Structure formats: C-alpha cells, structure tokens
Amino acid sequence: LTAASLTAASLTAASLTVETAESRLEYLKSRGVEVETVEDRRAMNEERTGGVAEVVRQLMNTAGCSKETDEKVEGTEFAFVPHDTSKPIRSVFLPSVAAGSGDKLPAFVKPYFADSNAIDVNLLNEQATKQFSSGQLKGMDPSNISASAMNRVAAQGSVETFPLVHPGETNKFCGVYIYLDEVGLLKKLPPNLRASQIATSCGYAPPPNFYGDIFIGRVQTKPVMSNVDFKVGEDTDPGSVWMRRAVQENVDWQQEMNKVTNRTGELQPNKDGEGGVAKEEEGYSWTQDGEEVEIVISFKEPVDKKKVKVKCKPKTLNVTYGGEQKLDLQLYAAIDVDGMAWTCGSDAAGHMLTITVEKAEEGVSWPRVTK
C-alpha cells in the first residue's frame, strides 16, 4: 500500500465512523430515546444564561437578582472575594461541563474582568518604564506599549494568577491561587485588603497589593493538573490548615528556586517608598512604612518656617511657600488629619521641608502617593 492509499483509507474510515455515529444517534432519537450531546448542553447553557457569562450570572443571582434560572450549579467550588469588606466572601462554581485537565479558572473568570474602565496613561508609562528597565525586558522600548492597546485588553478581560502557596509533596501537590484583574492597578481599582491579609497569612511580607475584586481557587498538579474544591468558610478561615502550612511551604519553595537559579537570600522586593528608599516624583520624594507616609520637598536655600503653609484634608494635601504653591495632591488613600506634622531642616544633601501624614488604615502599602 502507498502513503496516498493509506491516507485515503483513513479518511474513508473516519467518514464511515461519523456516519455510523450520526446514524446511531438518529436511530435512537427516532425511537423516543433522549440523547444529550455536547452541542445540546452548550445550546442549553446559552439559552439558560441568556448570553451572560456563567461566572457573572452566578454572582448576579447570589446577589439577589432574579432566581428564575438560579438552579444549583454542580462543579468545582472556588471563592469570590469582593474588595468591599462590607460584602461577604461567596462561593462560585466551575461547572462540571467546563472542567477538564489544566487550570480552567483563568478562562472562566475572565469575562468578570471585562469592562470599560479606562487605563490611566501616566500609571501605564510609569509601570512600563519600571518593567523595561530591569529583568528580562531590560533594554526594550516602553513606548511600544500604547494606552489604546491596553484599553482593548481591559475591555476583553485579562487575568493574572498569583500563587498563595505552590504545589508540593506536603500539600499533596495542591496549589492555591488568586485570580485578579491583570490591569487593576492601571484602572485605579480600590485595594482588596482581605486578599492582602490572606497573602500575609501565607507568609508574604510585605503583603502584595491586589486591586478590585478577586477569586481564589485550588489546583492539583498530580497525577493530572485539574481544579479541585476551595471551600468558602473552611478554606478562607485564617486558621485553616492549608494557610498555616503555607508559610513554611513557601519558604521551602523559594529556597529550591534559589538553588535552581543560583541565587541566595532572595527576598521580596520592596514596594515604592518602602525599606527607607525614597521614591522620586516631580517636585518631591516620599517614603512610607505601615503607619506613615513622609513627603520631602527640596529647597535651594534654608526654609523659612514662617513662609510655610500646609493644609490637609482626609484625601488632599496642599503646600505653599511664600504664597507659591509647592504641592497640591489628591492622595491615594485617606489620612488622619490630626496626625499630620511638618518640619524644616538641612543636611549634607541640602535644605528640605518634610511633611509626615498618618495613614487612616495602618498596614496598607500605598503603590503611589496620588490618586
């Protein structure tokens, strides 16, 4: 037999198989046997949800909307954590029909993050410059990233995965991950404090910042990668077994990665303004810790305190010197107005006016000073 004849034979066999399967299906249906195919299930799902993404439909219904189509969803449980702490953490389910090998949650939750919130161009340029100045992207031109392109990505939904704990032998190869809006920071979404607190419980210090609503799910990697249940209540409790073990498991994982990459003592990088390293901005620099933000304005001559006027409100800071405006900031987060103080002085670096403000919410890291 030639290759051509083998190919023809294969095509003929495939054709006969399809015809046989279709014939059998028609035969059964003609005799009153109910047969549900994959295509039938997809059509039923589209009709049931009215074209609304399943993850969105579940959250809408559990929020008290129409219950006409709110039948119980069978599938793998995971958690929805709103940024608004007045709203409860809720269960969401990856339907059985959507399950399979691999992590299916990024694709499943993606429609939730699709919206028309515009990207902040200044933040985009700042983040792009930071990313392109180091690491694997060093030397590339940040101008190649346009705001319009990022807005198109945001409109379609974009998901970032953050590991709360990596899979390993001690957790039976089950990793736990946060799924968040990849451009939440650039959209200026509000911080998700509960997500940061959970990351802290898992050993991340300082805690990462997450923006907007997030999801948390569990993935088992052996023997086959698949999504498994992450239960609200049992697994979201700060005292849960997996969270208590996560601190040491993450240390072990980092040590193994350091060995592989020939790095030693690798730590989480400080965020802007942390670790005593000032972040330079136009007209001022700033540092922060868990309780305060310190803003420094440099002067060429000694500062005359009689000329200094500092006015602050919970979300604004205004500084003038001799009638000239030096700062007019819309602050990233609220401050305690009664805790504001300022001093003027000089050192080897020059003359300066230092304003210290207390964060209204302690322990929250500011990604930037301004809103």
Image (tube, grey):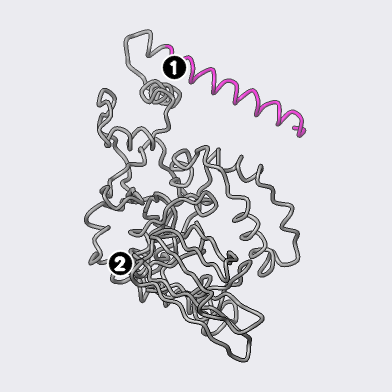
Q: Quadrant of residue 358?
A: bottom left
Q: CA distance from mark 1 to mark 2?
A: 52 Å
Quick one: 215 or 1, which is closer to the camera? 215
User: At which x and y percent is residue 217?
Assistant: 37, 53
> For the magenta stretch, what is the residue range?
1-26
User: At which x and y percent is residue 355?
Assistant: 47, 74
- Quick one: quadrant of the N terminus? top right
- Residue drawn where x is 38% and y is 59% of the image: 176
- Residue drawn where x is 29% and y is 35% of the image: 73
Q: Quadrant of residue 126?
A: bottom right
| Residue 171 can be seen, yes or no | no
Which three-letter amino acid code belongs to the residue tagged 2?
Met
Does residue 216 show up magenta in the picture? no
Q: Main secondary structure of the magenta part?
A: helix
**SS at badge 1:** helix
Question: Dot 2, crowdedness within 10 Å: few (<14), some or many (≥20)?
Answer: many
Say whether marks 1 and 2 touch (CB < 8 Å).
no
Question: Dot 1, crowdedness within 10 Å: few (<14), some or many (≥20)?
Answer: few
Q: Is residue 1 rendered to the left or right of residue 216?
A: right
Does residue 21 show up magenta in the picture? yes
- Residue drawn where x is 44% and y is 40% of the image: 112
**Numbered tag placed on residue 243 in the rendering:** 2
Earlier residue among tags 1 and 2:
1
Which three-letter amino acid code belongs to the residue tagged 1?
Arg
Residue that mark 1 sits on: 24
